[in-house]
Image: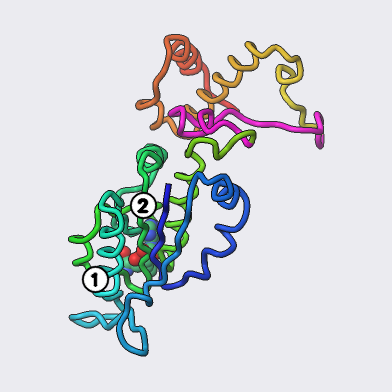
């Protein structure tokens, strides 16, 4: 997959793309990033990419011309590219969307800044994504959030680091709890079942813990989660006594 990122602050991406999973994914050839400076598409010596808002008001607005030029260049290179503006007005990004985007070959993520982008950008993009109901200074962190969530789903990326299939949201549930050594810390013990090596019982316990946590913390997820008859029975039992973790 190729992920292009259009930004006014290319240096923002150096460290995040250069470490951990995102760096390894590039090394394995699963993803290639290209960070593009929006100012490369501006005209004039001052490389102006923003201007005052029509109608007055505080702050500056990102100009259309450089962004549209960059989008056109991206579409000319690859008509299949999915052009996404990171914006608090967008659909809220989630694991289903990450899975959907991971099926694509090429994303172009646009990072807004200042008060945002001239609204007419809507006519040049494919979709708008928000990473949640709060305002960040720019689209760089949201673009990284999307790039990270999508890249870790690409074939071969996670390897031994943990199966993406079992993670929270991927199963429709929150994930079961994890423990590592020491077995006892400050009087807190690791659940005995995890120490006994019975993999079938461990799998059952983990499934039940995931159901229990989801019921306690995010009951809204249960309505959409694919549940077996056994899951439903377990949830029914839980409903009869209060859920504690
Ligand atoms: C300071 S914000 C602009 C906020 C805008 N004035 C508003 O009230 O909706 C600047 C840029 O950061 C990005 N941004 C901020 N919060 C975001 C969020 N929750 N999700 C996605 N992008 C976000 C967008 O690219 C946005 O254009």
For the view shown, which residue lies furthest in the bottom direction?
45
Residue depicted at 62% across the width and 30% down the height: 177
Read off the magenta span: 161-186
Q: Is residue 166 magenta?
A: yes
Kindly identify the residue that appears in the image at 48 percent across and 45 percent down: 151
In the rendered image of this protein, does residue 46 appear above or below residue 37? below
Main SS category, magenta section:
loop
Given residues 160 and 127, the one toward you in this image is 160
Residue 24 at x, y percent in the picture:
60, 48
Observer-nearest of 211 and 216: 211
Image quadrant where residue 56 sits = bottom left
Quadrant of ligand 1 in image: bottom left
Would you call the spot at circle 2 few (<14 residues within 10 Å), some (14-19), or many (20 or more)? many
Q: Is residue 72 visible?
A: yes
Point out the tag, 1 or 2, that comes first from the N-terminus.
Answer: 2
Which of the labelled discs sits on residue 107, or is there none? 2
Residue pictured at 54% horizontal, 36% vertical: 156
Relative to residue 29, is residue 53 drawn left or right? left
Residue 59 visible here: no
User: Where residue 53 sits: x, y (%)?
Assistant: 24, 80
From the viewer's side, name the closer residue of 239 and 198. Answer: 198
Q: Is residue 41 above or below residue 133?
A: below
Secondary structure under tag 1 reads loop
Q: Can you identify the residue that label 1 sits on?
A: 118
Q: Are marks 1 and 2 in contact (CB under 8 Å)?
A: no
Q: Secondary structure at mark 2?
A: strand
């Amino acid at each position: 997959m190729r992920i292009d990122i259009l930004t006014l602050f290319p240096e923002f991406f150096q460290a995040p793309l250069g470490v951990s999973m995102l760096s390894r994914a590039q090394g394995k050839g699963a993803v290639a990033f290209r960070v593009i400076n929006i100012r490369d598409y501006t005209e004039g010596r001052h490389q102006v990419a923003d201007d005052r808002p029509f109608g007055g008001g505080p702050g500056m607005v990102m100009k259309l011309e450089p962004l549209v030029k960059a989008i056109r260049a991206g579409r000319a290179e690859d008509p299949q590219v999915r052009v996404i503006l990171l914006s608090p007005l967008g659909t809220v990004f989630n694991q289903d969307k990450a899975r959907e985007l991971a099926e694509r070959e090429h994303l172009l993520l646009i990072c807004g800044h200042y008060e945002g982008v001239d609204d007419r950008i809507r006519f040049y993009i494919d979709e708008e994504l928000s990473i949640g109901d709060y305002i960040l200074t720019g689209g760089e962190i949201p673009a990284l959030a999307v790039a990270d969530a999508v890249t870790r789903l690409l074939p071969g990326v996670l390897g031994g680091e943990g199966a993406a299939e079992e993670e929270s949201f991927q199963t429709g549930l929150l994930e079961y709890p994890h423990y590592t050594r020491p077995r006892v810390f400050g009087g807190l013990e690791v659940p005995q079942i995890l120490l006994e090596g019975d993999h079938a019982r461990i799998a059952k316990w983990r499934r039940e813990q995931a159901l229990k946590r989801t019921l306690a913390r995010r009951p809204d997820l249960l309505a959409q989660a694919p549940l077996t008859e056994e899951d439903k029975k377990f949830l029914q039992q839980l409903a009869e006594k209060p859920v504690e973790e």
